[in-house]
Amino acid sequence: MIKHLARGVMTAVLVLTSAVGLGVSASAEEDQFAPTRAFWTQYGVPAETQDALIAELLAGGTIDAFDQNAVPVSSRQHTTLEDSSTVATFSDGSILVTSRERPDRRLTSNSVTPDAVTTYLGDCSVTSGAGWVSYRGCNVEATDGIRYIGYKASYEKYSSGNAQILATWDAHVSCTYGSMTTPTVAYSRLQSTSTQSAVVKRVSTWTGTGGNSSETMYLSLWVTRAGAASVGTS
C-alpha cells in the first residue's frame, strides 16, 4: 500500500512538471494531489478533511502529521501476510502510516527454529536457524500521504538475547507537494545492549513549495535485544 503511494507520487511529480511547462496549472494541481487523495481515502480520511488539509498546505502552512511533537488522537495496527503497519490519526484528521515488511508471517512459527528455513517476499527474506533469525533486504517505510520516506534493512536476532542491525541502504523519498532532501543517517546503534535497542534513524528535510514552511521527517528501525522490530518516525 505504501509502495503504491510512492509510485503515484512519482507519476504526479512528472505530470505536474509537464503541465506547468504547458501552463495548465489548475489541472496540474488536481493531478498533483490525486495520489494523496486516493491514499487518504483508502485509510478513511473524509473528503472535507482532505480539502482542509490541502488548503492549509497551499496557504503555506503544515499539517499535524508533519509535526514530530504532535500526539496522535488514535492509533491502529494493520498486519497482513506481507507487512505490519501502524496508522496514526491526528487532531486535524491527517494520518501517518509506518510499515515494515514481514515475510515471516508466511511461516507457521516466528520463533527461532533448529532447521534453517528461508521465506521470500520480493527482495525481502527471512531465514531461521539454530539460535538465530535473519531478515535481509526488507522495506521500512513511512508516509503521511504528502511525504514518503523508505529504505531497505537487514537485521538479525539471536536466542542468546541480543540483536543487531546489519545494514540499511537504498534510502529514497518522494512527495506530492514541496521537495525533500536525500535521506541521511542521523543516528545509529547497530548492536542492542542489556538496556537499549539497536536502532538506525534516517532523516530528510521537507520544504513546502515557495519555501514558506519546512519540517524534518525521520524514519527509524528499532530492534530490541529480544528481536522485536518496530518502525517509528522519531
Image: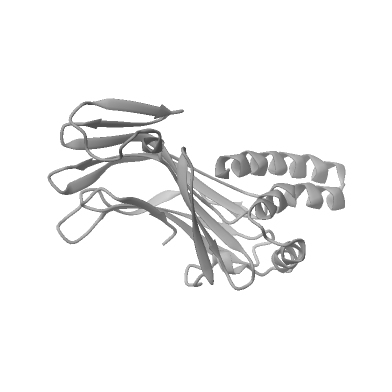
Name the image colouring: one colour
- Seen from the viewer's position, the closer of residues 146 and 162 is 162
Whole-percent x and y of residue 68?
48, 67
Residue 213, by quadrant, is bottom right
- Seen from the viewer's position, the closer of residues 93 and 114 is 114
- Indicate whether 212 appears above or below 6: below
Lateral position of residue 49 relative to residue 89, left or right: right
- Seen from the viewer's position, the closer of residues 180 and 158 is 158
Lateral position of residue 214 relative to residue 227, left or right: right
Whole-percent x and y of residue 88?
53, 62
Residue 208, by quadrant, is bottom right
Lateral position of residue 194 relative to residue 118, left or right: left
Residue 177, by quadrant, is bottom right
Whole-percent x and y of residue 92?
64, 71
Q: In which quadrant of the rendered image does the C terminus lie?
A: bottom left
Lateral position of residue 214 relative to residue 141, left or right: right
Q: Which residue lies most toward the left here?
A: 160
Residue at point 69% right, 68% down?
60
Residue at point 18% right, 61% down?
195
- Indicate whether 185 appears above or below 123: below
- Total number of numbered labels? 0
Q: In which quadrant of the rendered image does the N terminus lie?
A: top right
Residue at point 87% right, 47% down?
24
- Indicate whether 188 appears above or below 67: above
Q: Which residue lies most toward the front here?
A: 108
Whole-percent x and y of residue 198?
26, 52
